[in-house]
């Protein structure tokens, strides 16, 4: 079964316009709606900023191994 994905805006009357696709004419379809959310880079950075620090990986490995095998 082939899946079609598209974005649409629901009108004030609650109407969604489906893109023209003759292969769907006169057939039954299943519809799932998901509200679109905006992706914000600032939210991502707030959540993961400390995790994705620009620390030198080799220095961090050296410090870790030096402490572990003292």
Image (spheres, rainbow, N blue to C red):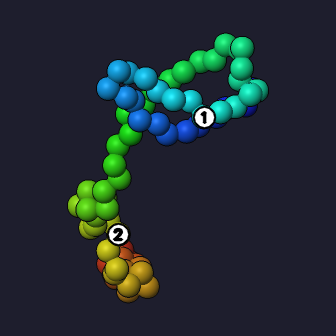
Q: Nearer the viewer, mark 1 or mark 2?
A: 1
Q: How many marks?
A: 2
Residue placed most toward the observer, 23 or 12: 12
Res 33 → quadrant: top left
Q: Earlier in the sequence, mark 1 or mark 2?
A: 1
Q: Which element carries disc 1, helix, strand or loop?
A: loop
**Quarter in which the N terminus is drawn:** top right
Whether residue 13 is situated above or below residue 70 in the rendered picture:
above
The answer to whether mark 1 and mark 2 are in CB contact below 8 A is no
Position in image of residue 27 (x %, y %): 71, 14
Query: Can the viewer see residue 34 in this picture?
Result: yes
Left or right, residue 19 beside residue 12: right
Left or right, residue 23 beside residue 53: right
Position in image of residue 53 (x %, y %): 32, 74
Q: State the separation of the CA atoms marked 1 and 2.
A: 40 Å
Query: Can the viewer see residue 48 in this picture?
Result: no
Residue placed most toward the observer, 15 or 65: 15
Residue at horizontal 65 percent and vertical 33 percent from the top:
20
Position in image of residue 29 (x %, y %): 63, 17
Res 54 → quadrant: bottom left
Identify residue for label 1: 19
Identify residue for label 2: 52
């Amino acid at each position: 079964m082939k899946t079609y994905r598209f974005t649409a805006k629901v009108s004030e009357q609650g109407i969604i316009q489906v893109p023209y696709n003759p292969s769907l004419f006169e057939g039954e379809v299943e519809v799932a709606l998901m509200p679109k959310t905006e992706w914000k880079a600032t939210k991502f950075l707030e959540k993961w900023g400390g995790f994705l620090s620009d620390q030198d990986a080799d220095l961090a490995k050296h410090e870790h191994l030096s402490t572990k095998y003292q």
